[in-house]
Image: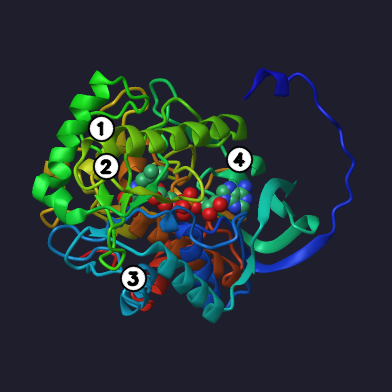
Amino acid sequence: MHPSLTTATLTETLTTPIEYAGDVLVIGAGSAGVGAALAAARSGKKTTLVDPAGFIGGTLVSGIPIGGCYDGEKQVVKGIFHEMWERLHALDGCDDHPDQTTWLNIDPEKLKIVLLEMLGEAGVQLRLHTFFSRASMNGSSINAAIVEGKGGRLALQAGLYIDTTGDADLAISAGVPIAKGRTLDGKMQPMSLIFAVGNIDLDRFQKWGGYGKMESVWNEISVREHFRNPRRGNLSGMWGSPERSGERTFNVTRVTGLDGSDAHTLSRAEVEGRRQAWEFLYDFLQPHIPGFEKSFVSWTSAKIGVRETRRIVGEYILTRDDIWNFVKFPDAINCGSYPIDIHSPTDATTDYPTDHFYGGKYWTIPYRSLVPLKVDNLLVAGRCLSATHEALSAVRVMANTMGMGEAAGFAAALALQHKTTPRRLDARLVQDAMLQHGAWLGD
Ligand SMILES: Cc1cc2nc3c(=O)[nH]c(=O)nc-3n(C[C@H](O)[C@H](O)[C@H](O)COP(=O)(O)OP(=O)(O)OC[C@H]3O[C@@H](n4cnc5c(N)ncnc54)[C@H](O)[C@@H]3O)c2cc1C
C-alpha cells in the first residue's frame, strides 16, 4: 500500500440498510461465480450474484481461450462448463470441441450473452455495478456482506456466502487466514493486459512464417531495442475466431512485481499493461512483421488480467505434488489436466513442463480446498481457492474455475438443505449432485 494511505484513519459511524439477498449470495461474477450461482439457483435456492462490472464473466470474457477441459484422450470437465460450450457452439461462438482440444477459442461477446441467458433462465438475481467492501460478522459467521454500488451502501444478507472474487475479498474481511504468492518471498505471477489487433493481412503474415517466426523475431528485437515488456522466450499466444477476419487477440504483455489486490499497484499495472500493448503493436508488429502494416488495436480487455493474488487457507491446501502425481482425492469435486504453468514473478521465463502432462492423465481438486478455515457460512471457489502458488498455476484455468464454482454452488444449497455448515457437509452429497447434473468426476 502507498505509504501516505497508511498514516491516518477515519472513524465512521454508519447506518446501513439491510437487504435480503436470498439463500445464497455469490460475490464475483467470473467463471467461478457463474458456476456457483447457476448451481445454487438450479438447486432451488434464491441466489444473488454481485459484480462491479456492467457485464457477466470476469476474466472468462476477456478474450483468452478456455483451457483445461481435455487431458489428451478425453474431456475431463463437463457439467455447467459443457452446457455453456454447447450454447456457445450453437451460436458459432466456439468452433473447437472440448473432447478434442484443451484450448477452446471463444467469441467473448457471444459468451457474454450466453452467460446472461443461462443465469436468467435459472432465476439468478443480478446485482451489477456493485462492489463488495466488507464483511459484517456475528462470531464465526458472516452476518452481512457490505456492498457499495449505484444507489449507495447496502448490507446484503443471505443464508450462505460464496467468495468468487478471485482475490478472496470476502474471505479475508471475514477473518479467513490467507496466503499470497510463492513461499520463498510472497511474489505473485505477473499480470497481462489482453488486447486485440484488427486489419491484419493474415495471408501475408502466414506466408512470411507466422506465429513461430514472429516469436523468434520478438526475442531478437525486444532485446536489441530494450522494449519495456520483459517477456522473452515464448509469448503466450495469438488467436481469434474465424468470423473475426483479420483480427487476432494477444496475450503477450507482462507486468511483474505488482499486487493485483491493491488498487494503488493495480492502477500502475493498468498503465504499464496498456503501454506494453501499444509498444507491441506500434514498435514491434507494425514496423517489423509483414501483414501488420495497416493494423490497429481493435479492443482491450475491460481490465488487466490478474493471474494470482490471495489464496484462502482452507481445510486442505492443494500442493504441487498433488498436481504432479495426479492424486485422486476421495472428495474430488473437479478434474483437470492443465500443467503447472508459472509465469515467473521476477524474470522473463515461464515454468511450463507440458511433457509430464496430458496423455490421458488428470488431477483432481478436493472439496476441502473450497472450505475456508475459521468462518462457518462461507465457501470459496476460483483462483482464490486453498492451494499453493504452484498448484494454483495449474488449477486456475477456466474450465476448472467454473467447475469449482459449480461445486461450491451445490455445496451451499446442500448445506442449507441439511441445516449444516459447508465444513460438516458430507462431500459425497456434493459429488452426487454434480454427477446428477452432468459433471465428470473421474473414472
Ligand atoms: C493474462 C491471463 C491469461 C490467462 N490465460 C488463460 C487461458 O488462456 N485459458 C484459461 O483457461 N485460463 C487462463 N487464465 C487463467 C484464468 O483466466 C483465471 O484464473 C480465471 O478466469 C479466474 O476465474 P475466477 O472466476 O476465479 O476469477 P475472475 O475471472 O477474476 O472473476 C472474479 C470476479 O469477481 C469480481 N470481483 C472482484 N472483486 C470484487 C469485489 N470486491 N466485489 C464484487 N465483485 C468482485 C470481478 O469483477 C470478477 O468479475 C489466464 C489468466 C490471466 C490473468
Q: Mark 4 or 3 closer to N-term?
A: 3
Amino acid at circle 1: Thr
Amino acid at circle 4: Ile
Q: Residues within 10 Å of mark 3 (few under 14, many from 20)?
A: many
Q: Mark 1 or 4 closer to N-term?
A: 4
Nearer to us in this view, 310 or 114: 114
Nearer the observer: mark 1 or 4; the answer is 1
Identify the residue under disc 4: 172
Identify the residue under disc 3: 93
If the image is split into quadrants, where does the C terminus sit?
A: bottom left
Q: Is mark 3 within 8 Å of ligand 1?
A: no
Q: Mark 2 or 1 closer to N-term?
A: 2
Nearer to us in this view, 307 or 325: 307
Q: Is mark 1 within 8 Å of ligand 1?
A: no
Dots 2, 3 in contact, CB < 8 A:
no
Dots 2, 1 in contact, CB < 8 A:
yes
Does residue 221 sit above or below 33 in this rendering? above
Q: Mark 3 or 1 closer to N-term?
A: 3
